[in-house]
Structure formats: C-alpha cells, structure tokens
Amino acid sequence: MAFTPSSPSSPSGPPSFPRPRFPRGPVPNQNKDEHRLNERIRVPQVRLIDEKGEQVGVVPTFEALQMARDRGLDLMEVSPNAQPPVCKICDYGKFKYEKKKKEQVAKKKQTVIKVKEVQLRPQTEEHDLEYKFKNVRQFLEDGDKAKITIMFRGREITYADQGFKIMKQLAELVKDVGNVEAPPKLEGKKLIMVLAPGASKKQSATPGPTIIVAKAK
C-alpha cells in the first residue's frame, strides 16, 4: 500500500503557494534618453533633416532610419508634436557631450549671491555697532546681500525709533558699496532691512542668472 502525504491545512484540495510580492513605488525609467532614437521612433513617416542641417523632406520612417544607419549615425526625434514629427540624423553621443559641455559653461557664468544676516539689538553698544557695520560692508564688497534684523524683546518695542535710526545710519555708511533693496520694515518685533551690493568688478566679470541662497551670519 502506497503512502500518500497529507496537507494539514487542505487534505483534499490543491497545494497553496505564497502570494508574490512586487516592489512598491513608480517603475524606474529604463531609458534615460530625452529624445526618441532609431527604432523607438514608431510613426509611419517623419520630416527629415540630414546631418548637415539640410531639409530632406517627408520620408517614410524606415527609410530615414536606413539613411542614418548607412552614415553610421542615429535618427533622433527633435520635434515630436509636429505633423509629421521632425527627426534629424546625427551622432547622438556627440550631441549629448556638446550639450553637457554647454550646460557646464553656463553654470560657471552664474552669479551666486548669498544673503548674509546680521542681527542687532536696539541698545547695541557703539563699538559693537561698528564691528557689525564692518561685516555688512565686507558682505557687500564680496557681492553678497545683507539682511539686517533688529530684535525687540518685551518693552524694547518702544525703542523702534532707535532701530530706524540705526538702519538709516548703516545705509548711509555703506552707500558707496551697496544700496537699500528693501527699506526698514517692522514685522512684529523685528525691524528688517535688506541691502544689495552695488555695481562691482566681481559682478560685471561674471554675468548670468542669479541664484539667491539664504545664509545666516
């Protein structure tokens, strides 16, 4: 008599298997190219530009792909929303290299302006004010912005006029290297003024977009 093993959970039914687990989250993009290339271009026809930048005209996609292969190059889709889509014959590796090089050059030309914050009190001693004012001047000469904040605690808010006086004094002392971008403004128990650097050799030597980076000092 043959021995038949029994299942404790289901003696007569089919064996049970654990459910497969799938990773959560979005499926990663396996193709990181920003342009469709070669066989990924699946429209019947395209408007073709050759490797010299000359218009070839509307041709079947398989014919444009064969032309690129005959030249040892790639067929790249440059305008997918056009009717028909516009494609160009090019060396895609060289295209990506030159684009990356241009982005690096543009990044080097960016002017990074940091915002340095200087905190004062309405009853700050004269020698401390001189030290703080020197710091503000240095920030402006370096091409950075300066955010001056005067903090009032408790009944010190009654000295708000003294705070405005300090702000006016500072703006006057550094007017040769900076200007008032945001005039003194009372926000709750804080009096805030922002100074921006004036035209300098440093700024004129590095034209380009400006990135504002907040940084306390």
Image (cartoon, rainbow, N blue to C red):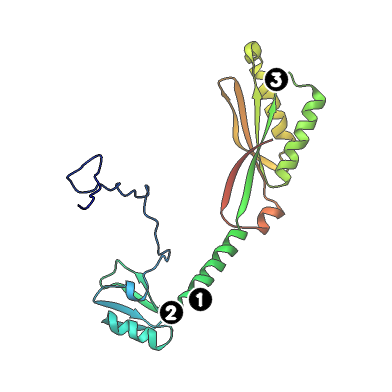
Q: Nearer the viewer, residue 210 or 91?
A: 91
Disc 3 vs disc 1: Cβ atoms closer than 8 Å?
no
Amino acid under disc 3: Pro
Residues at marks 3 and 1, CA–CA distance in whole angstroms = 61 Å
Residue appearing at x 77%, y 27% in the figure: 129
* Direction front: furthest residue: 1
In primary-sequence order, the first of circles 3 and 2 is 2
Would you say 16 lies left or right of 154 here?
left
Element under label 3? Answer: loop
Classify mark 2: residues with Cα within 10 Å, few (<14), some (14-19) or many (20+): many
Residue holding disc 1 = 94
Is residue 56 in view? Answer: no
Residue holding disc 3 = 122
Amino acid under disc 1: Lys
Residues at marks 3 and 2, CA–CA distance in whole angstroms = 66 Å
Location of residue 82 with respect to 20 vertically, above or below:
below
Q: Position of residue 125 (x, y in %)?
A: 79, 21
Residues at marks 2 and 1, CA–CA distance in whole angstroms = 8 Å
Q: Nearer the viewer, residue 11 or 188?
A: 11
In primary-sequence order, the first of circles 3 and 1 is 1
Residue holding disc 2 = 90
Q: Quadrant of the C terminus?
A: top right
Element under label 2? Answer: strand
Q: Nearer the viewer, residue 77 or 12?
A: 12
